[in-house]
Amino acid sequence: MVAYDESDEEGEGATPEGPSRSQVKREHRALQDLAERLLALPRAELERLRLSEATWVAIDETARIRDPRALRRHYKRIANLLEREDPEPIAALTAAREALARQTSARHHETERWRERLIEEGDAALGELLARYPTSDRQQLRALVRAARRDRDQGRPEGPRRLFRAIRDLVEGAGEG
């Protein structure tokens, strides 16, 4: 129900107090999305949050729900419970997990691009890779590139996979340092 300013008896200039119904729906939908992301996290990470007992009971019930419609209703129930919780730590945790997933995906795509370039371009791409990752072993990479080309031409996946793993180790090793 929307409350209007009663100071104007004719209704002109009447403004609703508080958020609109659409805004309330958007906020609740955001809480439902947060509930879905929250339930996708590992239990160990959820335990760092200080959630109420009722919220934990609802989270534990999620594993037993199989029907998609019932699961949507359950997300709404958890969203209602999350309204009573402090949303900041929950949002921060899910945002940190999503940022980590984006970084992991970006490293994976970078590794795939390097593998394709090394197989297609050979020594030119190898020189760039060695300049970017100077701790890498030139001879080992050159042998892996040759094996990857040979296996790709023969339709075998082993060579490209070994090259991918070697590049992944380089990229991840550089990311940690």
Image: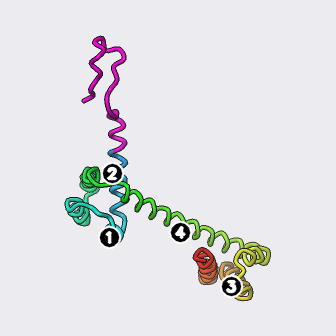
* Furthest-right residue in this view: 124
Prevailing secondary structure class for the magenta stretch in the rendered image = loop
Of residues 35 and 12, the one nearer the viewer is: 12
Q: Residue at x 61, y 77 (%)?
A: 177
Q: Whole-percent x and y of residue 39?
A: 33, 62
Q: Quadrant of residue 18?
A: top left
Q: Quadrant of residue 90?
A: bottom left
Q: Which residue is mark 3?
A: 144
Q: Which residue is mark 2?
A: 32
Q: Horizontal placement of 137 versus 84: left or right? A: right
Q: CA distance from mark 1 to mark 4?
A: 21 Å
Give the residue type at disc 1.
Arg
Of badges 3 and 1, the one in the foreground is: 1
Q: Whole-percent x and y of residue 125?
A: 75, 73
Q: Residue at x 70, y 80 (%)?
A: 149
Give the residue type at disc 2.
Gln
Residue at disc 3, secondary structure: helix
Dot 2 or dot 3: first in sequence order is: 2
Dot 4 or dot 3: first in sequence order is: 4
Q: Residue at x 35, y 60 (%)?
A: 38
Q: Which residue is mark 4?
A: 104
Please give the range of residues in magenta: 1-27
Q: Is residue 66 magenta?
A: no
Dot 4 or dot 2: first in sequence order is: 2
Give the residue type at disc 3.
Leu
Residue at disc 2, secondary structure: helix
Q: Which residue is mark 1?
A: 43
Dot 3 or dot 1: first in sequence order is: 1
Q: Badge 4, how many Cα within 10 Å: few under 14, some, many 20+?
A: few
Residue at disc 1, secondary structure: helix
Dot 1 or dot 4: first in sequence order is: 1
